[in-house]
Amino acid sequence: MLRWLRGFVLPAAACQSAEPPTRYETLFQALDRNGDGVVDIRELQEGLKSLGIPLGQDAEEKIFTTGDVNKDGKLDFEEFMKYLKDHEKKMKLAFKSLDKNNDGKIEASEIVQSLETLGLTISEQQAELILQSIDADGTMTVDWNEWRDYFLFNPATDIEEIVRFWKHSTGIDIGDSLTIPDEFTEDEKKSGQWWRQLLAGGVAGAVSRTSTAPLDRLKVMMQVHGSKSMNIFGGFRQMIKEGGIRSLWRGNGTNVIKIAPETAVKFWAYEQYKKLLTEEGQKIGTFERFVSGSMAGATAQTFIYPMEVLKTRLAVGKTGQYSGIYDCAKKILKHEGFGAFYKGYIPNLLGIIPYAGIDLAVYELLKSHWLDNFAKDSVNPGVMVLLGCGALSSTCGQLASYPLALVRTRMQAQAMVEGAPQLNMVGLFRRIISKEGLPGLYRGITPNFMKVLPAVGISYVVYENMKQTLGVTQK
């Protein structure tokens, strides 16, 4: 998400009457807390905080290391002034790139036009909200002085960094998600922010999946056995009676272990597909993001799919049937061959397209609706709005792809069901509809939906705490 800084805005009189060095001196004195003529990193952080613009550790360190030319661990006035002059030149270029008609002011229509060239589509009303967050004099246009003061301490170096806002993915994992992977800037990649964010998301996903594992196992049991008589309470009683309380988490170990390789492959593949679908230096559009994300999801699923089969077999298996993941894999390989590790792969692959497409489309629709109807003085919807949009869009995606997910699970486990014929995808669809009707294609969806809200909540809390622990800069 873009950080639209509410920066240190100088009084109008000071901006009009003072020469640039005086303005620089005023700012330097505000940061030089002990008055010794130099500013260290701690004074910079405390000074920015007192001015009401804490940027986060990574951004503040970037300003400091860029400005500290002689690398003595301190900023003197000359270094500080040189940094701000160089930064203002970059901000001037960004301002001119937005000022399409060269009249010295940025208008809403120019913001819409500029974002379109970068692959971002917004309405005129959304552009006006962006203007309002920068506009200091209420004219609904932004001149150079307003722009400069607003982005004075923002370490962004070009217009693409300034307009990069609202990532679809928050790094939060709720188990069944096949959402578009997160995107990282070159600076985030160089500074190591990307792996910290992925690690935070991985830990959050592990805690979230473990917390909601009983509901996940119940869903799998209802999908596989397809019994109309098995309801939520009856299913829990049956599982506890058969294997005790611990059996509610059967298969969760595999579910957690596959997070790391799945995330790594999806992230790597997404970067490669983006390069293939866009020209060098071109901003990726919504359609390209969808295609790249879907293909990355398919690549990751191909790589980790055997673990999906192991998870299903362990979840459906009876107490003592398998001693662990390795024992389960060995028995499948011995009795059914390597091909058993890819049973249900085709419906799983087909399910990615409607899930990812509907998830992304509904998310963007909900977010745009909120901006057009509920946003007042900010273009930032806030984390709870984004989480709500994400949960609803994920739910819509799951509704569309759930029949394919159910058939996939049945194919993964049908060798374990006594007397069940070994059917392909089309045969299973026909059998389910003929014996259970259309509702049979949604068997187990209730516990699946029951886990969404607690999974999102738990994942978000753990994710935010992990980001703080790992020192991930807030954007």
Image: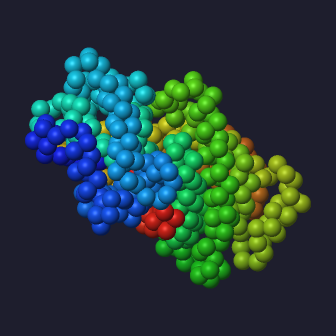
Q: Examine the rendered structure and indicate whether residue 465 appears above or below residue 339.
A: below
Q: Position of residue 433 (x, y in %)?
A: 58, 45
Q: Nearer the viewer, residue 334 or 394?
A: 394
Residue at point 36%, 59% (across, down): 38
Q: Examine the rendered structure and indicate whether residue 373 appears above or below residue 191.
A: above
Q: Nearer the viewer, residue 295 or 466?
A: 466
Residue at point 50%, 31% (across, down): 284
Q: Is residue 109 rendered to the left or right of residue 217?
A: left
Name the residue furthest top.
Answer: 101
Name the residue furthest right.
Answer: 334
Q: Is residue 347 rendered to the left or right of residue 474?
A: right
Q: Position of residue 293 (x, y in %)?
A: 56, 39
Q: Can I make out residue 159 in this image? A: yes
Residue at point 46%, 32% (across, down): 286
Q: Nearer the viewer, residue 371 or 108?
A: 108
Q: Quadrant of residue 102?
A: top left
Q: Position of residue 61 (x, y in %)?
A: 45, 55
Q: Quadrant of residue 176?
A: bottom right
Q: Can I make out residue 179 in this image? A: no
Q: Is residue 155 rendered to the left or right of residue 246?
A: left
Q: Examine the rendered structure and indicate whether residue 48 appears above or below residue 104.
A: below
